[in-house]
Image (spheres, rainbow, N blue to C red):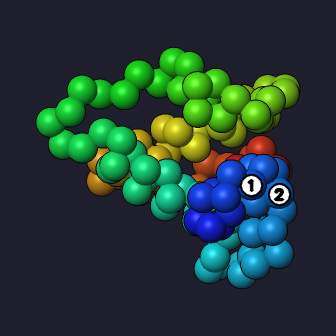
Amino acid sequence: MLSGLAACDDVSNLMAAAASSVVLGGFTPDVALLELAVTVLDLACPAGAEPLVCEGLRECHLPEVTFRGRVEHRNSQYALYAAACTRGGLQPDLLSDAAWWQTPL
């Protein structure tokens, strides 16, 4: 996934490629991307730096992705919040929180 991101591969293709590696109760692309997002937040906003502004973050850094519909908007918003929570020491309950959506986070 990291090499695909470094090569500027399409985000949809990266998710599709990672989906084939799902191990129930273990690895999922959702968890892998969440862990990556936490690392990115650590690099983008080190301790003592100005806080990042959430508004417009997706549009600025993922201009090639079009979020359509309520579910995609909600999932992307939840992913940003979950990464921030994880970085701050609060582990979100991904299974419970995302289960009612019935779609991959």
Judge by depth and name the residue closer to the eye, 2 or 95. Answer: 2
Residue 53 sits in quarter = top left
* Residue 99 showing in the rendered view: no
**Which residue: 15% across, 36% down?**
48
> Of the numbered discs in the image, which one, if any, rests on residue 17?
none
Binning the other alpha carbons within 10 Å of mark 1 as few (below 14), some (14 to 19) or many (20 upward) gives few
> Of the numbered discs in the image, which one, if any, rests on residue 13?
2
Residue 41 sits in quarter = top left
Q: In the image, is residue 60 above or below residue 2?
A: above
Q: Position of residue 24 (x, y in %)?
A: 72, 78
Marks 1 and 2 in Cβ contact (< 8 Å): yes
Q: Position of residue 97 (x, y in %)?
A: 61, 48
Q: Position of residue 39 (x, y in %)?
A: 40, 56
The residue that mark 1 highlights is: 9
In the image, taking residue 69 as reference, residue 51 lies left or right, namely: left
In the image, taking residue 84 as reference, residue 49 lies left or right, namely: left
Q: CA distance from mark 1 to mark 2?
A: 7 Å
Q: SS of the residue at dot 2?
A: helix
**Which residue: 29% across, 28% down?**
51
**Which residue: 58% across, 25% down?**
60
Q: Position of residue 68 (x, y in %)?
A: 84, 27
In the image, taking residue 31 as reference, residue 88 lies left or right, namely: left
Q: SS of the residue at dot 1?
A: loop
Indicate the amino acid at tag 1: Asp
Binning the other alpha carbons within 10 Å of mark 2 as few (below 14), some (14 to 19) or many (20 upward) gives few
**Which residue: 72% across, 81% down?**
23
